[in-house]
Image: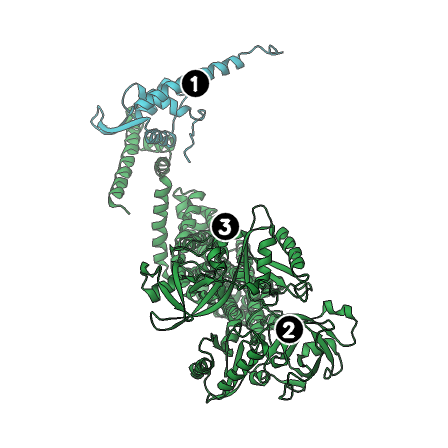
Chain colours: A cyan, B green
Amino acid sequence: MASPKSDLPQGTLDLLILKTVALGPVHGYAIAQRLQQISRDVVQVPGGSLYPALHRLETRKLLSAEWRQTASGRDAKFYRLTRSGRARLEAETANWKRLSETVGLILGMAEGGAQ
Amino acid sequence: MNWRRWLRREEKEANLARELSFHIEERVADMVRSGVSEEDARRRVRLEFGAAEQVKDECRDVRPARWVETFVQDTRYAWRNLRRNTGFAAVAVATLALGIGGLTAMFSAFDTILIRPLPYSDPDRLVMVWDDLSKTDDRTKSFPAPAEWYEWRRLNTVFTDIASTQPTEATLSGDAAPEQVPARKVTGNLWSVLGVKPLIGRVFNDEEDRNGVRVAMISYGLWQRRYGGSPDVLGRKIDVNDTPYEVIGVMPREFYFLPARDIDLWMPASFPAEMRRNFGWHDEEVVARLKAGVTREQAERSMAALSLQVTAKDYPRPHRTIMTSLREDLTGKTQTALVILLAASAALLLIACVNLANLLMSRGLARGRELAVRVALGAGGGRLAAQFLTESLVLSGLGALAGLALALPAMRFLASLVPETMGPVRLTLDWRVLAFSAAAAIAAALAFGVAPALQGSRTAPLDGLREGGRGAAGTRRYWFQHSLIVIETALAVALLTSGGLLLETFRHLRNTDLGVRREKLLTFETPLFRYKENDRRDAFVSAVLEKIRAIPGVINAGATSRLPLKANETAATFYWISGQPRERISGQVAIIRIVTRDYLPAIGARLREGRFFEASDRHSDAQVAIVNETFANTNFPGRSAIGAQFKFGRTGPKGYWYRIVGVVKEIHEVAMEEATRPVVYSLHEQGSDQLMIPPGGIAVRTAVEPASIVSAVRQAIWSIDKNQPIWRVETFDDIFARQLTTPTQSTALMGAFALLALLLASVGLYGVLSYAVTQRTSEIGVRMALGATSREILLTFGKRGLVLTVAGLAIGLALSTVASRFLNALLFGFRPDLVPIITVVSLILLGVAALASLAPARRASRVDPVMALRSE
């Protein structure tokens, strides 16, 4: 089914998308571009991961979507964060921070220090 | 499908396509801006983005209720597919309809008779208590006496309460045309023992029963029929056998309890005081409710001991009791028949499934290209398997619908399997049966759909697209299909053998020498409890028989204490032959029939030696008896029984000596399936009242159609005593036919299942061979071009059919020997010879298999090599 094909840990893609969308209504292509730019090309999201993820978040009502014109006058589907999406983003962000701190702590442990 | 939802779906699809193409176009535009050629940019985006169709599919997958959508889509696809192959679809649906319909009908009978709770509160706590007069291990059920019921009720420690009932018959008159209805006299506590309530009114109680209050409960049927369903019936006085009874309640429609036929009237038993001390009059059916925490085994032990104690001084022979569960008593031998037939119908459905699995796999191979294309377009294995399973479900759903259409008439046929004792119970197509049918359909779809689905899901795009698909892979592909053919052949053989066994048994039963001439023999019963003294009774019976003999068209008439084949109940006593040591008595039991002088000649009994009763056998004379062959052979092996003296009933010094004057050929006194037992025929006028079994069964030999003299017989009896009840009027042919109901039904059903199984198995064999021929046409062409003759090709395919059949036959015969062990219960003690049945079954199967293989094999042998090779 729709498993992320990037090397991102499971569930991370959803978090990144939520964060990107939190900055303002944005269409799928822009999300992909932004992720790639901000991560300095580390994160490359193929369409086969991005769009199922977007649709999944929309289905779960974390994102809402509407069709609008882009600056260049083309029709595109713009996603925006819903209220529960924002709540989830905050919760997930806090979660992620705690986790990464913990992981960092363990990885940073001096060799032999545990004894 | 809902139109608007469908529109929404179209819209969703369009939006999805727009969204993705926007992404791709933007990306391409970006690349072109950075100096890449458009053509190059498109190629790179495709690689980077992934296959658009696959992305779309993954997006669809996250939609809510996606599986419903997929299922609907698959179903429509499956439906289109089947519409394109009407021939295949028709065969598949018909096969499934037979399988599911048969199983559904059998289940409805099984459920109604064996599973559904009986209409009493907590029916599993109800037991029947019987006397066991045999004193041997064969546990013969006999009716208890009212006195025993009375004592048991007083002294038992294992029942909350215990009720007694006896069949009777009632003439309703006065308010409308006189009507004879089956009735039952019951003790006042029956209603509380069963835990049943009337539909309207109330039930009578112990006190009314004890005081002989004339009140009656009527059945729903009688209420509707005779009293128009009006509640006014309560409180109405109706004439029952010329005595006014007050109707106090109407029982619900679904109520039944131990009817001989459907009972219409229940009256208090109101035993007269002397009955409470009389241990000789055995006509009760006793039902009891186990106390909480008391098991049936405990109760049975406790009651057996109590019975010995109760009968120790009052009865010629102390005896124990037997306890049966109420269900067991109501369903009797139907139970085994139902289990076996249900298994047989399940086997038939299994064969149908195996057949379909085969057909689908052949089709799956034939659809290799279609599948390969779908795989190439990105369909995953799971997706293909789901598609295949959906097709199976659609087929099996259609099969179930058609099966229900078949099940309905089949259920009408099965209705006669409902034991008479279950009264108004009917087979209905209710939600339980529908649910079962749906479950069967789903199980069937899985059974025949999984293998083809797995096979289909493993399609590799290249294999399928390559033309022809010939080569070494072929044989391995057929391996599974061949095993399926062997399995279904084996099942068909087992069913055929079982059918053969039942048919042989049925023929045996049909041709059993009953010792009675069946044709033109009218029988009826006329309870003689109102004639208590032997002389009065004898005078009455003689007068009745005299009157009946005077009716034009009557050849002869006689009376017996119990008509042959009427019941499993047996009036049996111990006997002791002169010269034997006393201790032999306890092991010697004979069935006793008290008959009038003309009875044996009237029913067409045949003598082996000696004579029938004669006018000279007066009551003042020395007592005489006639015994059956079993009695003679058991006690006088190799010598004549004539002249021997023996005692029965009272075997002490006060008992009479009976002299054997004749030996008759076996008369089937008990049910057909029971082994023959020693029988003593004793003359009623010789004072046999020591046994208290009056000759209330009358047999009339006629020259004319028996039905035509029924009213004359009634008139003859009523001219002597207008209150004398007459009932169970039927010809001996009817009694015989009823004995054969279960064997007739089981044989017919098993036969039908077996023939269908044979048909399906041969269709399966034909299908697989034909398919093989089609697939290997070019190979055959090459072989023929290289010099193989038509005959060789014919043999190749013929041999394959033969090998499969023989393998199936071998396994099937092994299966049959196992099955025949389970069938024993339906074989009525008869052991048909398996060898001729197996021979016939094998010949039939080989013949049918030869026909089924011949057509494809001939087609193979007629392949034109030029055409075959060109078709590459």
Badge 3 amino acid: Asp
Q: Are marks 1 and 2 in contact (CB under 8 Å)?
A: no
Taking the image as shown, residue A12 lies to the left or right of residue B504, namely left
Check disc 1 and give the amino acid type: Trp
Measured as percent of width and height from the top left, residue B786 is found at 54, 66
Q: Is residue B815 above or below residue B533?
A: above
Residue B351, image x and y in percent? 50, 60
Give me the chain letter of mark 2: B
Residue placed farthest to the left in the image? A73
Q: Of callouts 2 and 3, which one flags the residue occurring earlier in the amino acid sequence?
A: 3
**Label 2 CA crowd tier, 10 Å (few <14, some 14–19, many 20+):** some
Q: Quadrant of residue B321?
A: bottom right
Q: Nearer the viewer, residue B817 or B463?
A: B817
Q: Residues within 10 Å of mark 1 (few under 14, many from 20)?
A: some
| Front residue of this view, candidates B659 and B70 | B659
**What's the CA distance linking mark 2 and mark 3?**
41 Å
Pointers 2 and 3 within a single chain:
yes
The quadrant holding residue B581 is: bottom right
Q: Is residue B534 above or below residue A32?
A: below
Foreground disc of the pair 1, 2: 2
Alpha carbons under labels 1 and 2: distance apart: 100 Å
Q: Which residue is mark 1?
A: A96
- To which residue does mark 3 refer? B122
Q: Mark 2 — residue?
A: B690
Q: Chain of mark 3?
A: B
Question: Crowding at label 3, few (<14), some or many (≥20) Cα neighbours within 10 Å?
Answer: few
| Left or right: residue B715 compared with residue B732 | left
What element does badge 1 sit on? helix
Are dots 1 and 2 on a single chain?
no
Q: Is residue B467 visible?
A: no
| Closer to the eye: label 2 or 3 | 2
Judged from the image, the secondary structure of the residue bearing numbered disc 2 is: helix
